[in-house]
Image (cartoon, coloured by chain):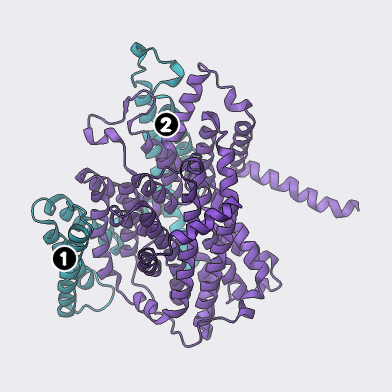
Chain colours: A purple, B cyan
Amino acid sequence: MEGLVLLGQGVAHFLTPWSLFNVIWATLLGVTIGILPGLTATMGVALLVTLTYKMAPDQAILTLMCVYLGAIYGGSRTAILLNIPGTPANAAATLDGYPLARQGKAGLAMGLATTSSTLGTMVGIFFLAIIAPVLSEAALKFGSYEFFWLALFGVVISGQMTGSDTPLKGYIAGILGLLIAMIGMETLHAHQRFTFGITALGGGVDLIPAMVGAFGLAEILSAMKRKAVAQVVPVNDRVVPSLKEIFQYWRTIIRSGIIGTFIGIIPGVGEDVGSWSSYAAAKRASKHPEEFGKGSQEGLIAAETGDNAVVSAAMIPTLTLALPGSAAAAVLIAAMLIHGIRPGPMLMVENAPFLYQVVAMLLLATIANLIFGLSLTKLFIKVLAVPRERLMAVIYILCVVGSFAITQRMFDVYVMLIFGVVGFLLREMKYPMAPLVLGIVLGDLLDLNLRRGLALTNGDPSPFFTRPISAVLCAIIVVIVLMSIPAISTRVKGIFRRGAEGRPARS
Amino acid sequence: MQDNSDARDEGVRARADLLTALILVGLGCVVIYLSWTMPRLEARRIHPSTIPGLVPFFLGIGLAFCGGLLALRSWRIQAPGGWQGLFGLVKTREALRVGVLLALALVHTLVLVGLIPFWAAAMLFIFAFIMIFETWLSDGPAEPLKSALWALAIAIVGGGGIYLVFERIFLVRLP
């Protein structure tokens, strides 16, 4: 009951002209960022942190949240009309969105993507409002031992699930991120590590310049490397879908929403995995799996419900444990800290209304997406016609401004340049960025809690393995790592397969 | 034809992975050495299990180990012509585009910013960027006059707009 009151207050808090104005421009900007190939949600949020620097904390986070959700939704337009995902989260939407557009149903595809995005966000919001307060209360019992394992779990699971080529590359990206977090003054004994006499490194590598480089400059380099994009498919049919067209797939919507929520709760995995997982599950459960990849409305709905559910659900670990649920959520954590909001288990104690304000932010952002998505089709198609040569030049200047403005040091601009080049090279070699970001965010948490835990026990590591939650987290990490070894995972799968084949024979 | 291209790309990536893996093993070893030789703060009587180099030491081992595994995995992949393909990448048009962009970015950030006002550096960068990528490095037929007009307009609106919005409206200091 108290939760419902706080939720009502959260929504009422933002029903002011100034807040609604911020929702409108930030959502339009987010959708535009999502539509433009080469600009991602993480990049948009990272660049906009600078612009929201002087805003009130609630308005700043509202703005960033609208950009985040708008960009994830906006990417579906590009996927449908150009066969190019506007953001990585929309890659699965190209499989059925583009064939639908080629069949002359571009408007319907956009309408389905818009409504399913809204429904996906709603499912995520529902679970955020229910799970976050419970998890937050449970997390109050966590000590150094549990936080050490949680940090390690975040990096390991992110590495495992986002390493598209091999999990090994995900783990390497995670370790590199953790090593970057080791640079600068450590918090237990105030000793400077890996600074090599460079004063500016004393405070460590700031997350915002690193993210602007890895997601801004690296994206510019990737976009400008490629050849120019293809022609936009014309839109001649209606955009607003009928209720029957949507709700005949209600099972797919609920399933994809739940899968997206589950993926969102896992630290650092992100929207693309949510989208692909929902798509795969929908194909397995569908009565017409043969239509998937050829213009299946169900496939498009599954992909777009899944990725948008991740956005809301990613806020669950972000707000309650300070473990980012996605790369963009990592930037949101940095933005919250800049504005004096401390995410983590103490959030519900220190600032409980904020959690429900985040729920309200997501609600307003998704309503704005729905309205703009169904009404401003022609305007958004025009955005697709902007040549990247003219856009990327301005984006680079924004990268310089974005990395400089927070601490006003040219050193941060150099950090952005280095992360941009290294991030580009790593992407080209199929290293995922999410574990790297998660490593940078969680490095201090991991390091501090391991050594603090050891200090508390005078060097005895046994509580790390004997406390119940620690033991479970440790076991999960061991299983994840073992299952990423091909020889072991093949044998385990073989055992399960033999078991499944053997069962009917016995009956 | 497609299969041949995929096989070639896989071979190039296998060799790129091998090269990166060896660099990562080297980096891991350097981190292990630096962590091992990091001060252990005995004078402050801290517990040996809380020394600053503890976590970096294990991360160094992890990096060297994962790098080693990746090197082994990449080494086992048959990649005839892989090295040739990998070093041939630097001569492609894609590499030229990336190289030119980086050169422009470095000149703007390391030379122009600080030497001239930020808005002027931004305008110069935007103008040069658009002109180069729409004429010399263009994918399609170039229209220099049209590009020059667009580049000039975007440089003035973009460079000036960023200055106005950030420094004048949002009161954010620029480099």
Find residue A186 and report its horizontal and vertical position in percent: 36, 29
Q: Which mark is residue B65?
A: none
- For discs 1 and 2, the disc positioned in front in the rendered view: 1
Q: Residue at x 52, y 69 (%)?
A: A93
Question: Disc 1 or 2, which lies upstream in sequence?
Answer: 2
List the residue tagged with mark 2. Answer: B60
Q: Quadrant of residue A474?
A: top right
Find residue A412 and report its horizontal and vertical position in percent: 25, 45
List the residue tagged with mark 1. Answer: B160
Q: Amino acid at mark 1?
A: Gly
Find residue B21 and report its horizontal and vertical position in percent: 42, 41
| Disc 2, SS | helix
Distance (Cα) linking label 1 and label 2: 46 Å
Find residue B137 and report its horizontal and vertical position in percent: 23, 69
The numbered mark 1 sits on a residue in which chain?
B
Q: Nearer the viewer, residue A348 or A61?
A: A348
Q: Residue at x 55, y 36 (%)?
A: A140
Q: Amino acid at mark 2?
A: Gly
Is residue B147 positioned above or below B45 on the image? below
